[in-house]
């Protein structure tokens, strides 16, 4: 799956990951692998990243990760992070 505007694609735990960095200083990690939430069902896990690339749990998006996400949820969540 090619996600629009991805910054970096990488392989992880028999799966795939994408990292994004947005102009507002936030970023995102989108992964689908053996141990991600939903990876065994072909779904994605999304995490918000801060300007240092660390997981960020203090946004209105989520205080954890967004798991079991299909393509539509991934795109919508990326748009929300980009708009923070």
Image: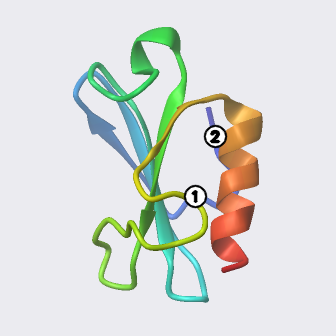
Query: Which quadrant holds residue 81?
Result: bottom right
> Of residues 29 and 3, which is closer to you in this image?
29
- Residue 55 in the image: x percent, y percent? 32, 65
Q: What crowding class fits label 1: few (fewer than 14 Cα within 10 Å), some (14-19), or many (20 or more)?
A: some
Residue shown at the point (67%, 54%) measured from the top left? 77
Q: In the shown orientation, is residue 41 left or right of residue 56?
A: right
Depicted 36 relative to depicted 7: above or below:
above
Seen from this angle, which residue lies furthest bottom?
24
Front-most of 62 and 43? 62
Quadrant holding the N terminus? top right
Kindly give the residue lying farthest to the left in the view shown. Answer: 13
Furthest residue toward top: 41
Q: Give residue 41's position: percent from left, percent from top.
A: 50, 10
Q: Is residue 81 above or below residue 23?
A: above
Q: SS at mark 2? A: loop
Return the x and y of residue 43 as percentages of the image width and height.
Answer: 54, 23
Q: Give whichever of 76, 8 is nearer the camera.
A: 76
Q: Where is residue 47 in the image (x, y as percent from the top left)?
A: 44, 54
For label 2, the residue is: 2
In three-dimensional space, the C-alpha distance between marks 2 and 1, rounded to whole angstroms, equals 8 Å
Quarter of the image that includes the C terminus: bottom right
**Residues at discs 2 and 1 in contact (Cβ within 8 Å):** yes
Which residue has dot 1 on it?
Answer: 6
| Lateral position of residue 18 relative to residue 6, left or right | left
Please give left or right for residue 83 compared with residue 23 in the image. right
Disc 1, SS: loop
Rendered residue at 42%/21% (across/down)? 39
Q: Count neighbours of disc 2 (C-alpha within 10 A) and say few if under 14, some if 14 to 19, many if 20 or more.
A: few
Give the quarter of the image for residue 69: top right
């Amino acid at each position: 799956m090619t996600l629009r505007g991805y910054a970096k694609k990488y392989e992880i735990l028999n799966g795939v990951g994408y990292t994004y960095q947005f102009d507002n200083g936030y970023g995102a990690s989108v992964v689908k692998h053996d141990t991600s939430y939903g990876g065994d069902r072909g779904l994605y896990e999304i995490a918000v990243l801060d300007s240092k690339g660390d997981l960020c749990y203090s946004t209105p998006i989520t205080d954890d990760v967004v798991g079991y996400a299909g393509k539509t949820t991934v795109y919508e969540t990326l748009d929300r992070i980009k708009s923070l």
